Image (spheres, rainbow, N blue to C red):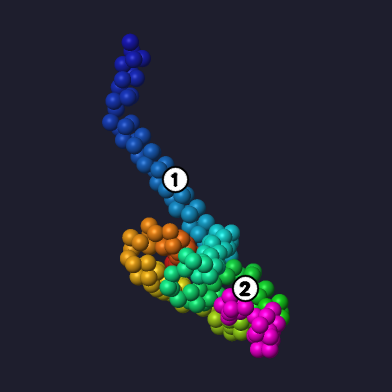
Amino acid sequence: MKGAKNYLKMSTDPTLSEAASKLISSDLKDIGEATRKLADHVIKIGVSGGFITTFLQWIACFAAIYLLILDRTNWRTKILTSLLVPYIFLTLPEWLFGILHGDIGKWITLVGVVLRLFFREHYPEYLELPGSLLLLVVVAPNFVTDYVRVGWIGVIVYLVIRCYLLQEHIRASGGFKNAFTKSNGISNTIGIVLLFIFPIWAIIGLIF
């Protein structure tokens, strides 16, 4: 009985309850701090050329290419797809941009220019935008490649492009509802929404 009384006394002791509460609060605070540091490190590693950044850049590029392909089908809408060229230029993964910015890209561009000038029958119309993209990558000065592509200017540019394409698509589809319900509308809407993923990640990286 004496042991039971002591147990009841300990379990109802306000001092012990307060100490336990403080201990739990301290543990939760430590867990929260560790979680915050982990998220901060993941963001910094991902943004500074890590897997997450590269993966999201590929998603952005594939979404833009997907929209360019749709523009050649019956599911096309009246949006200015030429804006996808600077968007792809700004979101190309670093290693691929480096390859195309070097001699390989220069040789491909040279062949394309020669075909365009002297053998137009061998230069189909659907290569116009890819050719313009490659030419833009090759001739871009260091200020654009080293500062604009990785800074706030680039983020603002592809955010503006994405928002403009979305509002043009909604208007061309006949309203917001049609853009998300009709087959030719939703196919383009998916691609345009995917364009927004990498800019959001880039903004997070620049802030943190």
Type of secondary structure dominating the magenta stretch? helix
Residue range in magenta is 108-133
**Secondary structure under the numbered disc 1 in the rendered image:** helix
Q: Is residue 111 above or below residue 180?
A: below
The reply to whether the magenta stretch includes residue 124 is yes
**Secondary structure under the numbered disc 2 in the rendered image:** helix
Task: Describe residue 197's horizontal placement relative to residue 179 as left or right.
Answer: right
Residue located 32% across and 65% down the image? 175
Residue located 31% across and 16% down the image? 5
User: Relative to the observer, which residue lies in front, 134 or 70?
Assistant: 70
- Which residue type carries mark 1? Ile
- Which residue type carries mark 2? Phe
Q: Is residue 85 visible?
A: yes
- Can you tell which quarter of the image residue 133 is in? bottom right
Residue located 33% across and 63% down the image? 176
User: Relative to the observer, which residue lies in front, 72 or 166?
Assistant: 72
- Can you tell which quarter of the image residue 204 is in? bottom left
Q: Which mark is residue 97?
A: 2
Q: Quadrant of the N terminus?
A: top left
Determine which residue is flagged by label 1: 31
